[in-house]
Image: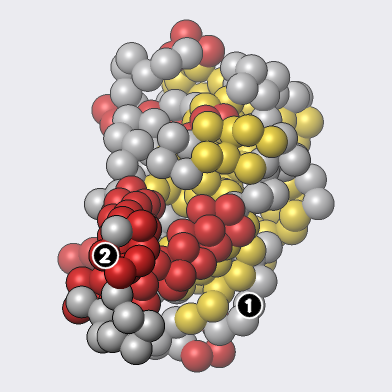
Amino acid sequence: MNFALILFIALVVTGAIWLLDALTAGRRRPKDAKLPWLVDYAKSFFPVILIVFVLRSFLVEPFKIPSGSMLPTLEIGDFILVNKFEYGIRLPILNKKVIALGDPQRGDVMVFRFPKDPSLDYIKRVVGLPGDTLEYRDKALYINGQAVPSQPAGTYNYVANGLNYIAGETRTERLGEHEHLAMVQADMPPVIMYQVDGDFPHRENCTYNEQGFVCKVPQGHYFMLGDNRDASNDSRYWGFVPDENIVGRAFMIWWNFGEFGRIGQSIK
């Protein structure tokens, strides 16, 4: 569901009703006369819809985390806020950047429209920038030939779909200015080969083997990985995220019904 489009239609309809009445019947209506119910509703809701539309389109948009692909950073059921202007001002609905303000940085947690189905919003961590060469070998990450700093950080246990109990090994990873936790499962391969899309755009930039993969990020694109490395459907399977698919940077957890202590936490 394209909520931005629904808001835009509601904005246009309520505004048109209010304006049409003001230019026609409203001119002849006594000042103390009761407004027709449709005009009354339009006049009441138009300012509210306008404020929500502007805030959601250009400043901050809320999202809910539906899966465990970003564990342990983000949990299922977290409600997050996404900064919509940090990477540039984009026209709502069209998603076209009109003012460039900044670019994604390594380590940012970013929301984007899924390249294979832009009606879906995904959230992953920015690992590769345009021009980077990424290598994921035996579950160790290398960027432009340099190993990403990583230290063991204990374990993280959770219950996955089907009531499967997962015991993950966590590590502290540093990408740019971001230090975060990533998680792997010892019994899982670096890449599940049969899940790799064979014809995603710029597929020729990637090579795969049993130890992992090497990818060269094309200009204007980004490479995304989930923090829950062995339970994430990310760029290693469906390719790169083009700049025009960017939604914004996730920066805060504003609500979680099951764990109030997470409310207000910044997203690292």
Could you tell me residue 16's position as x and y percent?
32, 55
Name the image quarter holding the C terminus.
Answer: bottom right
- Is residue 98 shown above or below 60? above
Instruction: Tell me which numbered mark, 2 or 1, is placed earlier along the sequence.
Output: 2
Q: What residue do we see at 44% from left, 72% from top?
A: 48
Could you tell me residue 235's position as x and y percent?
46, 33
Q: Which residue is mark 2?
A: 25
Give 46 or 58, whichever is nearer the viewer.
46
Q: What residue do we see at 28% from left, 85% from top?
A: 33
Name the kind of residue labelled 1 in the image: Gln
Position of residue 56 in the picture relative to residue 191 (left or right): right
Could you tell me residue 158's position as x and y percent?
39, 72
Residue at the top extreme of this rendering: 204
Could you tell me residue 161's position as x and y percent?
24, 64
Q: Quadrant of residue 267?
A: bottom right
Give 147 or 100, whichever is nearer the viewer.
100
Instruction: Point out which mark residue 265 bears.
Output: 1
Give 178 or 13, whichever is nearer the viewer.
13
Please name which of the two marks, 2 or 1, marks the residue nearer to the observer.
2
Q: What residue do we see at 48% from left, 81% from top?
A: 255
- Is residue 4 shown above or below 104? below
Position of residue 153 in the picture relative to residue 190 (left or right): right
Q: Quadrant of residue 163?
A: bottom left
Give 5 or 131, whichever is nearer the viewer.
5
Residue 228, can we see it?
no
Q: Quadrant of residue 45?
A: bottom left
